Image (tube, rainbow, N blue to C red):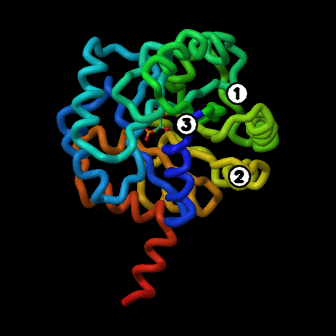
Amino acid sequence: MKDAIYNRLCESVTQRGGGFLLLVDPDRGELAEILALTEQAESAGVDAILVGTSFLMRPDFHDTMKELKALTSLPVVLFPGGASQVSPEADAILFMSLISGRNPNYLIEEQVKGAPFVKAYDLEAIPTGYMLIESGSYTSVEFVSGSRPIPRNKSDLACAHALAAQYLGMKMVYLEAGSGANHSVPDDMIQQVSSAIEIPLIVGGGIVAPDEAAQKISAGASFVVVGTRFESPGSFEKLKEYADACHPKLVVESSTSV
Ligand code: 1GP
C-alpha cells in the first residue's frame, strides 16, 4: 500500500513538533472565500488540507475538489462522511471507521461501498480510528451517524477504543468533538490517549483560538484540525497564527536563531 502522504505528515510532526490541518467542509461557509484562503495555506504553514462533511448536500462536490486541488500543492486528504465523498482528485483519504459508535453502517458498510473507488482512483488510504467525544452540544456527526459520543470525563474508555484501533492496524486515531462543538476534546483525555498509543493522534472540533490549538499539541495531539473558524471570513494572518501554534519546534528554532 502507498504511504507517501502518511510519511510526509509524520515527518512534519517530527520536524515541527506538531501539525495543523485545515478542514474545508464543502457544504459550509462561503466556499469561494475558503478556496481563496486555501491558496495561501501553504505559505501560512498549513501541513495539509482535509476535505469532507458529515452529510454531503452539494451536487458539484467533484468540481469543487478539482478547483481546490488546482489551488494548492499541499496534500489534499479526504475526510469523508460516507462513500459518496471519495474523489479521484484527492491525494489520500482518511479511511475511517467510527469506532466509538456501534452503528455497522459507519463501522464497515460505508467503507465497503467506498473501497472499490479508493482502488480505482489509486488513492492512498490512511486507516484511521475515528472517535466521537461528547462536546456539550448535539453535533451533526452525532445525528448523522446515529452513534453516541464517549463521555468527556471517561478517558479510560477513550484509551480502550484508541488501543483497539492501534491493535487492529489503524495508522491514526482521530478524537472528534464535532464541527462547531461547544467544547473541544479535553486536554486530560488527549494526554491519556496519546500516552496509551504509539500512532499519531488527530484532535479536532470546537477549537476556536490559536492558544487552544497549542494546548492540544502540548497535551499530546500530533495534529490539530480547524474548520469552522475559517468558514466566516478568515485571513492569512489568522491561518498563520494557528499554524505557528501547532508547530512549537519551529517557533523555538526561530526565536533562538535571532
Ligand atoms: C470537524 O474536527 C473538525 O470534523 C473541525 O471542527 O469545524 O469545529 O473546527 P471545527
Residue at 77% of width from left, 31% of height from top? 168
Q: Considering the numbered disc 3 on the image, is that residue within a helix, a strand or a loop? A: loop
Give the spatial CA distance, label 1 vs label 2.
16 Å
Q: Is mark 2 within 8 Å of ligand 1?
A: no
105 or 190, nearer to the observer: 105
Crowding near the residue tagged with mark 1, few <14, some 14–19, many ≥20 C-alpha atoms within 10 Å: many
- Is residue 153 found left or right of 250 in the rendered image? right
Mark 1 and ligand 1: say if the CB distance to the nearest ligand atom is below 8 Å. no
The kind of residue tagged 1 is: Ser
Q: Write the residue at 24% across / 21% down.
A: 63
Q: Position of residue 12 (x, y in %)?
A: 50, 58
Q: Is residue 198 above or below residue 79?
A: below
Q: In the rendered image of this protein, does residue 21 appear above or below residue 82?
A: below
- Disc 2 residue type (three-letter): Ser
Which residue is the site of mark 1? 100
Residue closest to the eye, 52 or 179: 52
Give the numbered dot on residue 2. Answer: 3
In this rendering, the answer to whether 48 lies above or below 81 is below
Label 2: which residue?
A: 194
Q: CA distance from mark 2 to mark 3?
A: 25 Å
